[in-house]
Amino acid sequence: MGEVSGDCLSALFKLRGVHQHYAQRASAVCGLDSVDFTLHRGDTCAVVGASGSGKSTLLNILGLLERPAGGQVEFFGHDVMTASADSLAQWRNRYLGFIFQSFNLLPRLSALDNVALPLLYRNHTRDAARALAAEHLQAVGLAHRAQHRPADLSGGQRQRVAIARALVGKPTLILADEPTGNLDQHCANDILELLLGLNHHHRVTLVMVTHDASLVQRFARRIEVTEGRLQERVEHVTA
């Protein structure tokens, strides 16, 4: 399979009857249990739940990082369950951006080269990749820190570098796993404003796992995961 044709389709993901189990000693632990879920282009979706409830499993499936044990998963109308590993890798690189609580920056690279890295995987030249990386660092307010390594940056600055790296490939979907968990409330609000601004101005779909109740109120869709089952609330978004 090659490129997905998603411009005219509103549904990024469709999950139907999805279940996932993990072996643990002599028993099986449920990751997801008969989940039905549709994610549309332009959605903002907060995912909440206790540790071990299935949040990470859901994020991994949406990130095309693992396939469930059963059920149907479609990405832009394509069957994820039968797609080749090469196709999944191509789709991840082209359409998805990942942001993690621990930043996952390479310590020996500058902020600029950390952001440029995904473009090098797409066979951009080094100069072209660094030029685009510089533009995205400027967009997140860190142009003046481009040559600094992660150890020389604050937590909030490192997360902004991670966001720039996630955005440099112009993803359709951003998956964020507790991206504000290591930040103070002021920095957390700044990071969320940045992400929601991308959703508003560029229709980038945003799915974020968070335990911060004040941030959850800013999302149009709120998914609570409990023992592998999803319950959704759709409410007025707090300004």
Image: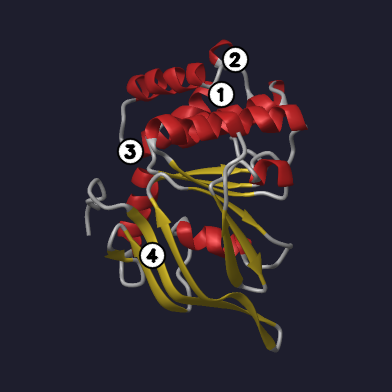
Q: Answer above or below: position of 167 versus 128.
A: below
Residue under the point 37% across and 39% down: 121
Tell us which disc is closer to us: 2 or 4. 4
Residue assigned mark 1: 111
Q: Answer above or below: position of 96 versus 156.
A: below
Residue 212: quarter of image: top right
Distance between the alpha carbons at the discs numbered 2 and 1: 7 Å
Q: What element carries label 4?
A: strand
Identity, as a three-letter code, of the amino acid under mark 3: Arg
Whether tag 2 and tag 4 are in contact, CB under 8 A, the answer is no
Which residue sits furthest right? 184
| Mark nearer the N terminus (3 vs 2) | 3
Identity, as a three-letter code, of the amino acid under mark 4: Lys
Residue assigned mark 2: 145
Numbered mark located on residue 14 in the image: 4
- Residue 35 x/y as whole percent: 51, 73
Whether tag 2 and tag 1 are in contact, CB under 8 A, the answer is yes
Residue 218: quarter of image: top right
- Whether residue 183 sits left or right of residue 195 in the image: it is right
